Image: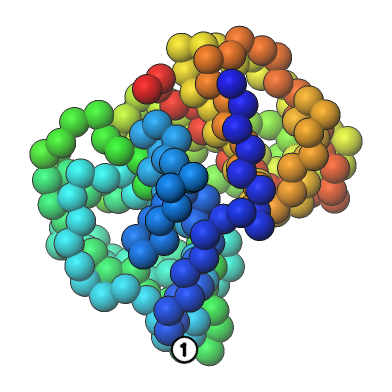
Amino acid sequence: MFCYTPAQKRGQTQVGWLTSYHTFPFGLYQDADLKNFGVLQAINDNTFSSGGGANMHPQSDMEMLCIILDGRLEHKDSLGKRAVLKAGDIQLTSAGKEIYHSELNASHNQPLRFLQIWISPFSKGLSPAYDKKRFSRSKLLNKLCLIASAQKKKLSLHINQDCKIFRSLLTMNKEITFLTANIHQYWLHIISGSLDLNGELLSAGDGFGIKDETQLIKLRGCATETDFLLFELPPQ
């Protein structure tokens, strides 16, 4: 089974300092025709205007990944963790039984853009945790770079779910192939650029899901550089 969510079909929230595009239902945006993809609960493309952001608030039982695309994000939480992240940085907050955190635009004259990704953990009431990493361009270029996993393989961020999250920068006409297995579900999200997936052209903001399939998937770059994420998720 394959499912395709084009960028223009995403939901949108625009409230004060926040502009957000939602691949799945989130917050005030709900759509009976749009469902979460298994444990993958949210992919939000967020832009905070200068000085904007979410002040300290509680969250529980969610794995929350932030990938900074432009600008600087200031993070604070009830664990005492503080960080200012810039483009290319990735942070993972495991809310566990409960964590208080704030996510603010660290700049008062430039916007902040980042991907906000939520994944349900394999169990409720876990201990909260925070970590951040940066992966070099050489690790991302024309290959699948593991950025988060349950086993913390290859120095990836640790996530409390049986999943793997990859990121890649695919240049024009370069190819990446992988074999899907029907014991997993897969979701592809295009951050920027465009690529060909077995004859299907996907562009920035598009999402493509695969489940109950065993098939060779070929990804070919169709832009100077295409930034994308690949999620390998447990079956539901």
- Look at label 1 and name its amino acid: His
Residue at (70% x, 14% y) in the render:
216
Q: Position of residue 223 (x, y in %)?
A: 84, 48
Task: Tell me if 122 is positioned left or right of 218 in this view.
Answer: left
Residue at image position (20%, 44%) is 61
Point out residue 6 in the picture as x, y percentages from the top left corner.
66, 48
Q: Is residue 78 above or below residue 152?
A: below
Front in this rendered view, residue 3 or 59:
3
Q: For the point 74% across and 49% down, which residue is it? A: 203
Image position of 79 with respect to 136: above or below: below
Q: Position of residue 143 (x, y in %)?
A: 68, 31
**Screen quadrant of the C terminus:** top left
Q: Position of residue 150 (x, y in %)?
A: 35, 27
Figure quadrant of the N terminus: top right
Residue 64 versus residue 154: which sits nearer the camera? 64
The residue furthest right is 173
Q: Residue furthest bottom?
A: 109
Report the side of 206 relative to 68 (left or right).
right
Position of 171 relative to 198 (above/below): below
Label 1 SS: loop
Q: Is residue 75 shown to the viewer in this render?
A: yes
Could you tell me which residue is drawn at 18 percent across and 31 percent down? 123
What residue is pinned by disc 1?
A: 108
Quarter-wise, where is residue 158 in the image?
top left
Q: Is residue 92 visible?
A: no
